Image (cartoon, rainbow, N blue to C red):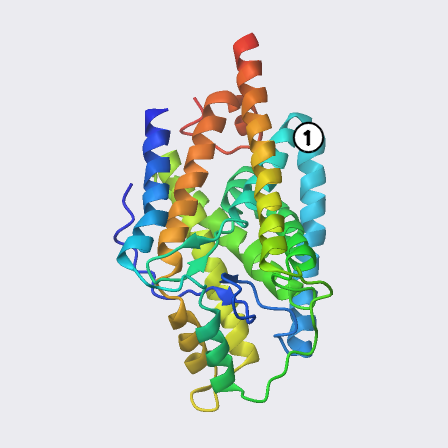
Amino acid sequence: MKKNLLLLAIVVLLAIIPLFIQKGAEFEGADGEAEAAIGEINADYEPWFESLWEPPSGEIESLLFALQAAIGAGFIGYFIGLMRGKHKES
Amino acid sequence: MKFSGWKLSYFLLAFLFVPNRAFAMHIMEGFLPIEWAIFWWVVSIPFIILGLRSIRKTIDANPETKMILGLSGAFAFVLSALKIPSVTGSCSHPTGVGLGTVLFGPLAMSVIGTIVLLFQALLLAHGGLTTLGANAFSMAVVGPIIAYYVFKGSQKMGLSFSLAVFLAAMLGDLGTYIVTSVQLALAFPSEVGGFMASFTKFAGIFALTQIPLAVSEGILTVVVMNFLKKYNVSELKALHVFSTKEAH
């Protein structure tokens, strides 16, 4: 248990440290650079297919991402509880 | 936990071309020329079919592993929804396919990974349907295959179970990005320098971004595995997760 908490602490630190060493960074994902890269390589390329549906706003998008994480986390929580319960019985 | 010695200099996240979309990793809808889109679909489909068979076989042989299969899917679902900041000042997300690979083998994950990608393509405009074949190949086919062989190889070398799991998940994650940069470089070779120049460019853009994320993914996979080792030993043995030495 202690070991797991330590491991989780490392994960949290790995996510937090960049926020401090990269003060003022955009944290946008590197799409801009990547888009520029494709533009440099092939300026004429036009995407030939559009997403069938896009989240109409950033809020809706974050809702769906939160939902995705929540569904997964919910199952993981259920799994952990179930297994611990079974373990206690046996 | 020693991961400083790995010279991982090539990998990249694919990306989203819509400004203000703060994450990367999948090739965007419409951003692969049609012949490549079809090519990667054709390459990926056999793996998905074999994966469905592999899952059916495992579940038939060991029905008690159904919940753990669900857990593997849930884990990939959560991890690919988390956009984590990295030292480069940009964000990306892990893949989460390493756990299921260690438990069920790489083929099973080609199905689960594709389901996650499909969800993101349809509901989040993240990745895409035309590029699903290519994205599935990187995240759901090659990533798991790398993870699988790293895991088996680490066990053969006599590394500890946890370290083997860690390396498998971490390198599978990184492998996914290498494949994505290869796919993009093949589709967009530079005028000067051709494929290699493009590959270096795509891989270079995100060279550092993925390192801490891959490490995080490795650690989280170990944490879940620690739980399974404690509460689900019989299932893990049924799935032949432990090497012969460890199966005490």
Residue drawn at (69%, 27%) of the image: B63
Q: Quadrant of the N terminus of chain B?
A: top left
Residue B35: horizontal and vertical position, in percent? 68, 78
The quadrant where residue B163 appears:
top left
Left or right: where B64 falls relative to B160: right
Residue drawn at (48%, 70%) of the image: A31
Element at badge 1? helix
Subunit under mark 1: B
Left or right: where B214 falls relative to A18: right
Q: Quadrant of the C terminus of chain B?
A: top left
Residue B106: horizontal and vertical position, in percent? 57, 48
The quadrant where residue B199 appears:
bottom left
* Kind of residue at badge 1: Ala
Left or right: where B135 falls relative to B147: right
Can residue A30 be spotted in the picture?
yes
Within 10 angstroms of label 1, few (less than 14), some, or many (20 or more) residues? few
Identify the residue under disc 1: B61
Residue drawn at (42%, 82%) of the image: B197
Residue B6: horizontal and vertical position, in percent? 30, 55
The quadrant where residue A85 appears:
top right
